[in-house]
Image (cartoon, grey):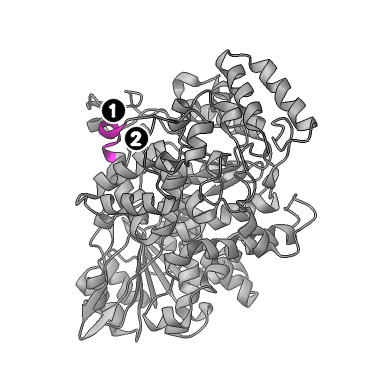
Amino acid sequence: MISLSKSINILRLLRVGRGALMQRTMKEMRNGGDSLVDVEGKSGFGGGLEDVYGEDRVTEDQLVTPWTVSVASGYTLLRDPRHNKGLAFTEKERDAHYLRGLLPPAVLSQELQEKKIIHNLRQYKVPLHKYMAMMDLQERNERLFYKLLIDNVEELLPVVYTPTVGEACQKYGSIFRRPQGLYISLKEKGKVLEVLKNWPEKSVQVIVVTDGERILGLGDLGSQGMGIPVGKLSLYTALGGVRPSACLPITIDVGTNNEQLLKDEFYTGLRHKRATGQEYTELLDEFMCAVKQNYGEKILVQFEDFANHNAFELLSRYRSTHLVFNDDIQGTASVVLAGIIAALKLVGGTLADHTFLFLGAGEAGTGIAELVALEVSKQTKAPLEHTRKKIWLVDSKGLIVSSRRESLQHFKKPWAHDHEPVKGLLDAVKAIKPTVLIGSSGVGKTFTKEVLEAMASFNEKPLILALSNPTSQSECTAEEAYKWSKGRAIFASGSPFDTVEYDGRVFVPGQANNAYIFPGFGLGLIISGAIRVHDDMLLAASEALAAQVTQENFDKGLIYPPFSNIRKISAHIAADVAAKAYQLGLGSRLPQPKDLFKYAESCMYTPIYRSYL
C-alpha cells in the first residue's frame, strides 16, 4: 500500500507538472515493493493493457489510489466520473485527498446514493427526462451509474436503450451537453489514425460504430445516431461486464439525407447530403485499417444501424480480416433463434418441422432466416440450400419468389423459392400457412387482425414475433396478439410491452432484445482472445440463451428468461462462445481456462466503490 506521505509527494509533483519525474518516482516505488502498478507494458485480460486502477478485477481487496496517477487535486477528483464517489468518500479519504470542505459533511453509502437516485428517477413522467438524468449520472459518477443500471435492469433498460434511445437520437442536437465517444467525419479523411489516438484510453477492446443512416426504425439521423453506440456500450458493461474504459463509441459522419436535420440550427453533424460510392468506401476502409493498427488484431468492431446496402457489404468485406460483428444482422438473428428454440417446448416439434414467414427482408429478416437455416442444417445434416426451403420472406413488393430473382438484391436471392406471385402479407400467410410469423419490417401495425386470425386458424399455438423497434413501429402490440389469437399465441416483441389480461388470464409478453446476446457474445470473444467471428459462435450463443429459460418461465408463456438474471446469462453465453472459439482454433488466449463460466464471471467488471486509502 502507498503511504500518505508518498501520495502527497506525488500530488505535489503533479501540481508542478513534473510528469517525467512523477513516472520515474512511480517506477521507483514499485521497485521498492509498493503495490502501484507500472503503467507500461502490462497485459490485461483479453490482450488489452492492464488497467491501472484494477478495473479488470472483481475482487475488492486491492486498495487503489488512482489520483496519484492522473488527478492533481481533490477538486479534480470530484469531476472525474470514473473515480468520483460523491458523498460516499469517507472521513479519512476526505482528509487524505484534499476533499475536506469540497463536500457537505454527510457521508452516504453507495446503497443509499442508489436509493436516492432511483427515487428521483421515478418522479419523472417523461422517459426522455429519465434518459437525460441517467446520462448526467454517467458523466459524473460512473460506478454509481452502472450499479443503478445493474440492480434495476428491467426498469432502466428501456430508458438507456430502446425505446427511449430512439427519441434521444432524434433530439440529440437539442439535448447534447458533453461529447461521448469519437466523431469521425469526412473532414478527418486521411487523419483517422490521429483521431483514434486522441481518445484517452489505450486499452480499448470493443468499438460500436454507426454511420447513423438507419437508426432503429427511425431512418437517417446522421451524427445524432451517436446515442446508439453510447447506449450499446453501456449495456456491454452493465450486462456483459466489459469494463467501461475498454469501450469506445464511434459515429462515422458522412452527411445526412434527412432534410429536417439539415435545416435544424441545432444539428451537430455535417450539413450536406450523404457521401456514397468511392468516397464512403475509402473513409470506412481507412477507419478499419486504423482501428487494427491502433488497437491490434483482437479489437472487436460492432457495426450498428448501417443501411442495408452498406451493412451487408461491410460485414462481407471485413469478416475475414477483422474481428467484426453486425448486431442488426447477427445479434438479432441469434436472439430470435434462441427464442424459437425455447418456444419449441411450448409449440412442439423440432425446428425442421416448422415453416417460417418473415415480413421484412432487410438486415434483420435475412440474418434471422440464415441463422435458422444454419441451425436446422446442423441438426438434420441437410444441406443449407434444402433447409432454406421452409423459410419464406415478404418484402415491400410481396412474397419473394423465383420469378422475381433477377430484380432482387443479392442478399434476398437465396430466399426466392418456387411459388406463384403473392402481393400482400395476408395472402402470403394464407398461401404458405406458416407456424412462425416474424416481423422485421420497421413498419408498425402490419400484423393486422385478419393476419393474426389467419395464423390462429391453422395453428394451435402460433408463434408471433413482432421485432421492429421502437414500440411505435412494432408490427402489433402484445394485447393485439393475444386478443386476436384468442389467447393462444406465443408472443415476443423487440420493444417491451406491459402484461396483458385476456379472458381471465394474465399474459407476460417476452422481449426478443438483442441485449440478451451481444454483451455476453462480446465478452466471450474477449476472454478467448478470438480473432474472427464464426457463424457457429452465433449458434452457440443462441443455444446457451435458450437453455436459460426455466419451466417457471414457460408456465408464464415466456420464451426468454427475465433480465433480472442477465449477468449470469451473459456469463453462460460468454463461456459457450469462448468454448466454440477454442474448438474452431480461433481462440488466442492460451492456455484455455478449465472452467470458462467461472473465468467469464471473474473477468466481469463490478461497479462497487473502491477504497481510496
The range drawn in magenta is 170-176
Question: Going 43% across and 41% down the picture, which residue do you hit?
Answer: 230
Within 10 Å of the Cα at label 1, are there few (<14), some (14-19), or many (20+) other Cα atoms?
many
Q: Can you say which quadrant of the picture contains the C terminus?
A: top right
Q: Going 76% across and 56% down the picture, which residue do you hit?
A: 585
Measure the alpha-carbon separation of dots 1 and 2: 8 Å
268 or 84: which is nearer to us?
Answer: 84
Mark linked to residue 351: none
Q: Quadrant of residue 122?
A: bottom left
* Depth check, front residue: 356 or 327: 327
* Residue 433 position in % (x across, y down): 36, 78
Q: Label 1: which residue?
A: 267
Q: Residue 334 in the image: state x and y as whole percent.
A: 51, 62
On the picture, is 8 further left or further right than 364?
Answer: right
Task: Tell me the amino acid under the disc marked 1.
Answer: Tyr
Q: Position of residue 456 (x, y in %)?
A: 29, 81
Please name the residue that numbered disc 2 is placed on: 224
Q: Left or right of 609: which side holds 31?
A: right
What SS does tag 2 mark? helix
Three-letter amino acid code at the position of disc 2: Gln
Q: Indicate yes or no whether the magenta region holds residue 518.
A: no
What is the crowding at mark 2: few (fewer than 14 residues within 10 Å), some, or many (at least 20)?
many
509 versus 96 height, above or below: below
Left or right of 267, for residue 591 = right
Identify the secondary structure beneath mark 1.
loop
Instruction: Specify the principal SS of the magenta part.
Output: helix
On screen, 229 above or below 530?
above
In front of the other: 429 or 135: 135
CB atoms of marks 1 and 2 within 8 Å: yes
